[in-house]
Amino acid sequence: MEQKANNQYLRRAKNSKKDEFYTQLADIERELKHYKAHFKGKVVYCNCDDPRVSNFFHYFSYNFDKLGIKKLITTCYKNQKMDLFSQNDTECAIYLEYKGEKNHENVPDPNEIGIKYLDSDGDFRNEESIELLKKADTVVTNPPFSLFREYVAQLIEYEKKFVIIGSLNAITYKEIFKLIREDRIWLGYGFKAGNAYFATPHPREFAKGVYNEKTGLVKFRNVTWFTNIDISKRHENLILYKTFNPDEYPAYDNYNAIEVSKTKDIPVDYIGAMGVPISFLDKYNPDQFEILGITDRDNNSGLKTKEYTEDCVPNPGDLNRRAVIKIGDKYKSTYARLLIKRRI
């Protein structure tokens, strides 16, 4: 129920464009400690971050020498005021280029480093922002969830390495799933216990249980880190121990594959196609498994065997979107499933 509620809130925020969520420093530190070697000698770009308040700027500027960063660039969107919750009420924005300068207190102070002004609003899609992007090697930030497709497409177009935050639902986006299937992007380490906490300028959008008045934070369980940087977890084998039997792993009625409802239950002795939860990607090792497709909307795997019609079922639209298990004369639609098989 909590996952479903989280999806609803993220979808509502995305549709209303009120999807600014400010990342906690502890979460940034917990994720980026796995990438330290990849920042050495690199230009890091945080292009959704006001350097005066961003925890991404804080992390990279305070660890600038330790990480061996060449240069840090940050920009923000429609904001010239120093306020965590930008009102996006100006047509111009600011940016900063940091090369390790510190004030007399040995602190990287953005105002002393020198805030610069953009002629444009700081949108990552405009020419000024793209010129800054071209200077960068690696992009690290929390982009607007509503623009995730465009944001990732731009990073791919300009061949940038990245570590960014996005909704788990993005895995099912046609454009994003294609990149995942081609092993061009994958999941990072994720948030502690799967709980992502963010500050938000729109607390009234969220119900009690999602927004905590005491902390001023919202909690999501369907948000994670996406990256295209090679990390060690990507090469760790998932330990399999269960064996296949047709009663526990029913075949789909409309796909040439079996249902595996939990990633940990993938049978060790089954070599055919399997449908697994999208959370499988958190354990995905491309040397151990091959991703064949996803049971969402289209037949991108070539494994779909049937299209339902109103002549045989009352709700063909719902059933045709997903993998279906037939129990007696009843049809049960599953959640979106990744279709995978073991590499032998």
Image (spheres, rainbow, N blue to C red):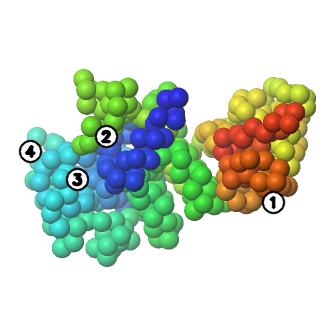
Q: Earlier in the sequence, mark 2 or mark 4?
A: 4
**Label 2, label 3: how far apart the Cα atoms are:** 23 Å
Q: Is residue 60 left or right of residue 342?
A: left
Mark nearest the camera among 1 and 2 is 2
Q: Earlier in the sequence, mark 4 or mark 3?
A: 3
Label 3: which residue?
Answer: 50
Tag 4 and tag 3, C-beta contact below 8 Å: no
Mark nearest the camera among 3 and 1 is 1
Quarter of the image where one finds residue 206: top left
Q: Is residue 54 left or right of residue 316?
A: left
What x and y, as percent, mark residue 270? 88, 38
Quarter of the image where one finds residue 118: bottom left
Bin the neighbour count of mark 2 within 10 Å (Cα to Cα): few under 14, some 14-19, many 20 and up: some
Label 2: which residue?
Answer: 205
Question: At label 4, which amino acid type do we have?
Answer: His
Residue closest to the eye, 7 or 178? 7
Q: At x 49% / y 66%, what residue is drawn?
A: 153
Q: Earlier in the sequence, mark 3 or mark 1?
A: 3
Q: Earlier in the sequence, mark 2 or mark 3?
A: 3
Label 1: which residue?
Answer: 302
**Label 2, label 4: how far apart the Cα atoms are:** 43 Å
Label 4: which residue?
Answer: 104
Q: Indicate whether 291 appears above or below 121.
A: above
Q: Indicate whether 332 appears above or below 126.
A: above
